[in-house]
Amino acid sequence: MNFDKTPGWMDWFVGPSTPRFKLPPGSVDAHCHVFGPGAEFPFAPERKYTPCDASKAQLYALRDHLGFARNVVVQATCHGADNRAMVDALIHSGGLARGVATVKRGISDDELQALHAAGVRGVRFNFVKRLVDFTPKDELLEIAGRIQQLGWHVVIYFEAVDLPELWDFFTALPTTVVVDHMGRPDVALPVDGPQFALFERFMREHPNVWSKVSCPERLSVTGPKALPGETSGARPAYRDVIPFARRIVETFPDRVLWGTDWPHPNLKDHMPDDGLLVDFIPRIATTAELQRKLLVDNPMRLYWPEEA
Ligand code: 0GY
């Protein structure tokens, strides 16, 4: 089966650099995806983009290159609620990957059990309008109630401007709730301004809410390059995201996760060097203790509690 990539689609970065930052032993890349391969695992008819292929073998080679020990593979919207590519990645990981699925109301208990056996530990609810069609809130709440019984959590993806409208729904969720990419703040706004204050309040008032402090490449306006006067040797990429991510890491050190977001869906300006992304970590988690919580203790507690 042939799939034509969305025009202008950028392939993932081949030959990522070796990070200078040495990840703590047992680090988890807690947000990454697989795409197809489309010939084996067809992309969903309702998808909003057609990506390049990005296989489990390529994902696990990146894991080893960067120095991660484990992955959390998150169902990407281009596969809709057909979790086969993600599940295939989990079952070929030797127990070193867990997953987050997309499910619909009609899923049976047996199907949920099969996902659990493969290593799925959460479902993703996506509110980013360019990525998905609307799903009624009562359907999502019903799903949340069912997966709660399996001990799973809910991952939510939304943009900061939509948080006020979604607040009541999010705060009614009965499980642990993990926010993708800090709720996509506008990093051109002040870190102490009302938009990010609302996100901090969301986390502060709701101890079941966690955040991925991932995707500086997606949020940054200043981008990956050094400024005039800065030496590129210091790898000072995505500097405008640092105050936001650092604030969340330091305020909620036991409820943060980090992931590469490989193979980086929907980037328009540049495709990040994953080695450079890893070197972003010590700029937002500045002590060995914060790094260990972010990369090892927290993801292990959420995804491998039997080993944590
Ligand atoms: C991400 C971000 C994006 C895409 C998806 O599932 C997806 O298609 O998550 C995005 O376009 O912002 O976290 O991978």
Image: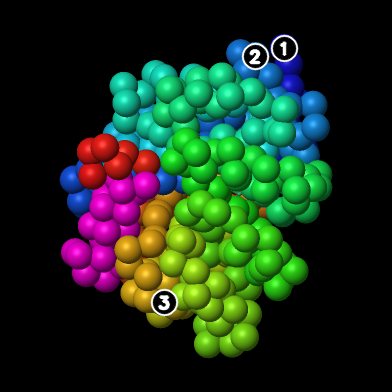
Q: Amino acid at mark 3?
A: Arg
Find disc 1 in the rendering and name its residue. Answer: 1
In the rendered image, which quarter contains the N terminus?
top right
Q: Does residue 55 belong to the magenta stretch?
A: no
Look at the picture and state if 142 lies above or below 228.
above
Q: Where residue 103 sits in the image (x, y, percent)? A: 65, 33
- Callout 1: CB less than 8 Å from ligand 1: no
Residue 272 position within the rendered picture, expressed as x and y whole percent measured from the top left? 50, 51
* Three-letter code for the amino acid on which mark 1 is drawn: Met
Label 1: few (<14), some (14–19) or many (≥20) C-alpha neighbours in 10 Å = few
- Tell me the element at label 1: loop
Task: Using the image as rendered, state which of residue 143 and residue 23 is in the foreground.
Answer: 143
Query: Residue 28 is drawn in which quadrant?
Result: top left
Q: Is residue 35 left or right of residue 208?
A: right
Magenta stretch encompasses residue 289: yes
In the rendered image, which residue does mark 2 sit on? 39
Q: For the point 34% across and 74% down, which residue is it? A: 250
Q: Which residue is mark 3?
A: 247
Residue at the image position 38 percent from the left and 62 percent from the top: 255
